Image (tube, grey):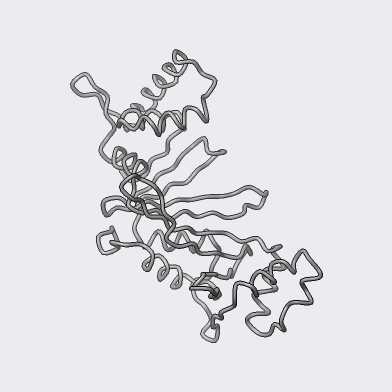
Amino acid sequence: MNHFSLSIEELIYCFYSEGFFEQGNALKQVYFGDLDDEKMDLVLQVSTRSLLAKNLLHYKKHKFALVNELADVISALNHSDQSIKLSRHGEDGSEETVSYHVSEGQLFEHSLKFDEQVHVFKMVTLEHVVSSISEFYQVGEKTAAEETGFSISQEEFEIMLDSLTDNQKLFELPKLEGVKQRFYQTLKKTSGRLNTMLFLEYGRNNEPEAKNMILFTNAPQENWVIEKVDEAFTVICGCQELIKKLVQENLQEKETMNNG
């Protein structure tokens, strides 16, 4: 079994079941802060039955326990070696997110549905991650052979973005030609909205540390990938091969992951 769909109540139960009370209590406070202990116990009892019905919970030796595959997912949520967090602007102004967690050489996908009321988990391969990220950010399968990237300073990039809302900044823009002009037109059409892909590592105290952040334009297709290198930004039209390169460069221990 490599696919799990859990309600928020079931997820809280799973954290409690595995002894991760801090995480369970944090979710309880957010979604059920007004419930007293008696009513919360009833919620957890209902979750027990629903997990049993899904065959995600079994009863042995007078004790309920999560199936091993789900226990692995909950353990990865509690502590991962690394994570990739994707975020983009939704069509209705909302934020859409997906996360990937690396734990003990395995990759888990974590997505949200129905206003974060349902959490969906999948055990995935590195190839699936690359394909899904490419689809999430709407980049093409290939970049045209004549397409080349370019480098711009942080100051020039900020002027580009500011000029979208401040006419005075238009006079500070250098002359844009070719691929730079195409990039700027994409920024204009998308009101300068940028999406993010964040690579995180976790230390002994489970504190996340940002390893790298990649930016994407927010067009319906053929989006640009923006990465800060030293004090400048490298910009290139995105493609699956570039996404694969970024994932492999930023994820350690890739040789131990499930590559299918």
The quarter of the image holding the C terminus is bottom left
Vertical placement of residue 32 versus 80, above or below: above
Vertical placement of residue 158 versus 151, above or below: above
Residue found at the far right of this picture: 167
Residue found at the far bottom of this picture: 146
Name the residue located 55 percent from the left edge and 38 percent from the top edge. 114
Residue found at the far top of this picture: 38
Q: Is residue 228 visible?
A: yes
The picture quadrant where one finds residue 251 is bottom left
Viewer-proximal residue, 259 or 17? 17
Is 75 positioned to the left or the right of 227 in the image? left
Q: Is residue 260 visible?
A: no
The quarter of the image holding the N terminus is top left
Residue 72 horizontal/vertical position (percent): 29, 42
Residue 12 horizontal/vertical position (percent): 41, 30
Name the residue located 34 percent from the left edge and 49 percent from the top edge. 123
Vertical placement of residue 185 versus 34, above or below: below
Name the residue located 47 percent from the left edge and 60 percent from the top edge. 133
Is 75 positioned to the left or the right of 214 in the image? left
Name the residue located 40 percent from the left edge and 53 percent from the top edge. 83
Residue 246 horizontal/vertical position (percent): 42, 68
Viewer-proximal residue, 46 or 8? 8
Residue 100 horizontal/vertical position (percent): 41, 52
